[in-house]
Amino acid sequence: MSHPLIQLIAGPTASGKSRLALEMAEKTGAVVVNADSQQLYADLRVLSARPSEADEAAAEHRLYGVADAADPWSVGRWGRAVGPLLAELAAQGRTAVIVGGTGLYFTSLTKGLADIPEVPHPVRDAAATAFGMLGEPEFRRRLAEIDADAAARIEAGDRQRLTRAWAVAEHTGRALSDWAADTRPMLAEGSWTGLVVEPAREVLYARCDARVGRMVDQGALDEVKALVARRLDPALPAMKAVGVREFADALSGEISLEIAIERTRQATRNYAKRQLTWFRNQTPDWPRHPGFA
């Protein structure tokens, strides 16, 4: 017996994609599955605009608020979580509506991404030092001995990619090119359909501005205050969420709340613009939905 198609719903922040996913889930009995890197974190319910408790009661939601802010998740880790979940749902004869704004999550589902182990800082630093000491021609020659494809493929002057290829090979004992060659989509061809929620830009920006105002009313400052009190590494993904730095500056008295709100609105609009560009470039053949008025 064939299973219902998995529905993928992508789009920028504040586009209305979560509302559309909920409507689909309520009609079909599907489970709403999170594909947004910030909505993974329990500490960011307000700032990430996670579905409300009422929404979660209306349809089953999975992979929302499952991570602590101190525990960084990568696209690979998300993939290792969502794969068994989809298999579990399929075994139950259920399907999923996977919704979010993190483009690489959708790429891993439909095209595949190499799940390369994280390279420790000392190894990366050593690669950078070697590049500086050897110079690009000699560095590239030595890289060719451990990753010939990368040495041939990476353009001249691209120090970052050259040193990354070296560091991955040194740390894992396997060429970066070999890791990349093993990629395959998580979802089988024909098992899914995709949709991008893409409102008109002026509508989207107005929705972004309004959302920031609602976040303040819903307790964004308290949420940031709790994060700041934990003294977490500012490099953690959760600490880089839009609004954390801005509202932290307001809480410390560095800027006024009004300035923090305006900066958060601008940062949110900028983020939405980057998402729009990504989905237009990476999913040009997916149907578009204009969102809601």
Image (cartoon, rainbow, N blue to C red):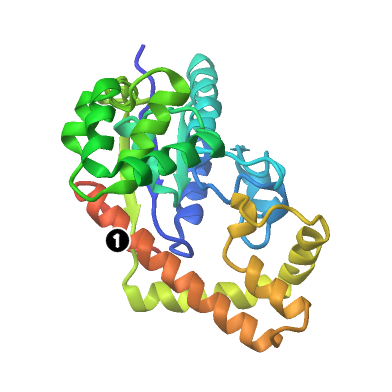
Disc 1 residue crowd, few under 14, some 14–19, many 20+, Cα 10 Å: few
61 on left or right of 224: left
Question: In this orientation, which residue lies closer to the viewer: 220 or 242?
Answer: 242
Residue 118, percent across and down? 51, 32
Q: Residue furthest top?
A: 1
The residue that disc 1 covers is 277
Q: Is residue 8 above or below residue 49?
A: above
Residue 269, percent across and down? 44, 73
Identity of the residue drawn at 33% across and 27% down = 176
Question: In this orientation, which residue lies closer to the viewer: 168 or 207?
Answer: 168
Q: Is residue 23 above or below residue 172?
A: below
- Secondary structure at badge 1 equals helix
Identity of the residue drawn at 34% across and 23% down = 179
> Which quadrant holds the C terminus?
bottom left
Q: Amino acid at mark 1?
A: Thr
Is residue 49 visible from the viewing direction of this image? no
Residue 214, percent across and down? 64, 74
Q: Is residue 2 above or below residue 78?
A: above
Residue 127, by quadrant, is top left
Residue 171, percent across and down? 47, 25
272 on left or right of 224: left
25 on left or right of 45: left
**Figure label count:** 1
